[in-house]
Image (cartoon, rainbow, N blue to C red):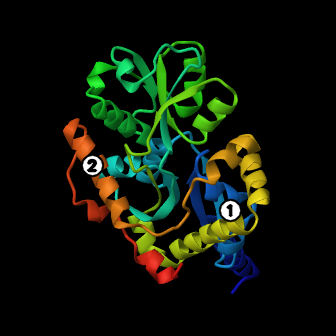
Amino acid sequence: MTLMALLSILFSSVAAQAESTESKEVRIGYQAASTMILLGKAKKFYDEEFVKAGYKVNYGLFLAGPPMIEAFASDRLDFIHTGDMPPVNGRSSGIDLKVIANAGLDLSHNAVLVAPDSPIKTPKDLKGKKVALPVGSSAHHFLYLLLAQNGLKVTDVTLVNLPAPDLATALGNHDVDAIAVWEPFTAKLELENKGKVLADSKGVKRAVNVYLTRNAFGKANPKLVQIFLKATKRAVDYYKSNPKEAVAAIAQESKFPEAVVAKIIRRYNFSLAISKEDITALGQVKDFLQETKTLRKDFPINELFDLSYLKQSRL
């Protein structure tokens, strides 16, 4: 064999190894409400756990759940945290995704807010008004339930589709009469005296946050799913043991004030376990989509969940 041939084989081998190393990454999508992912990212729990398996972590920040579901569909993310509406919507659109754990339950997670000087005093006063929200989000479903509880329909208000970060400006400029959103946006508006809560989701909607993976990815890489859950549990345990330090880390990572993070985080139950009530709650989301004729394809709600990873992880 010639020297040139040997060098060619050597370079090909090195290039293949480099390519293999570069391609070994996991991609985690998160948003401002992804409290434990934010903490795990700040404390490098995900990086530390995945590097043991030879993977690096690539993080992606999103404004809300629906764009993360779209990223799932195009194979640009492996793990995400969303509210309850995006995964149901995604599954009905044919995206093969699975809920793998609970990402935190806060009974008051969703809220409708009005300006501090608004004449709107009760949810019934929303009739004929403009309400801004991210369409397809958990806040959308909450508004539907809140209106129904008060004898109104979604058609009784004018919906304005806006990303969560733009809602405060729309409300402050009086471009809309009310907004529907989730934490930490609600707490920030309240603490800055830019909005007041007209009603929150407690007693109206069980606002379930969830962690998801693409089913094909999970089936091919069950150990990586367990690593994700392990790193997330490390974040939960760190918060429980070091609440003050955790709040500071989350605030720095999310760019929300510590006062905002501290106000909301104490309300959360961060158990990763999925309960029957959680499954029922996502079933109610599916019912909402059917009722509003926006469910593209029906499916048994249990198909949305794969809790085997959590069980095998023994967390």
Image vertical order of residue 195 relative to residue 209, above or below = above
Q: Nearer the viewer, residue 190 or 34?
A: 190
**Which residue, given by chain and number where applicable, does mark 2 sit on?**
286
**Which residue, given by chain and number where applicable, does mark 1 sit on?**
40
Q: Position of residue 76 (x, y in %)?
A: 51, 53
The N terminus lies in which quarter of the figure?
A: bottom right
Residue at x 22% of width, y 60% of height: 300
Image vertical order of residue 290 relative to residue 133, above or below = below
The C terminus lies in which quarter of the figure?
A: bottom right
Q: Position of residue 128 (x, y in %)?
A: 34, 14
Numbered circle sitting on residue 14: none
Q: Position of residue 213 (x, y in %)?
A: 46, 62
* First of labels 2, 1 by sequence position: 1
Residue 77 in sight from this viewpoint: no
Q: Residue furthest bottom?
A: 1
Q: How many marks?
A: 2
Q: Is residue 305 left or right of residue 192?
A: left
Numbered disc 2: secondary structure: helix
Residue at x 69% of width, y 58% of height: 39
Q: Dividing the picture into quarters, in which one does residue 192 lie? A: top right
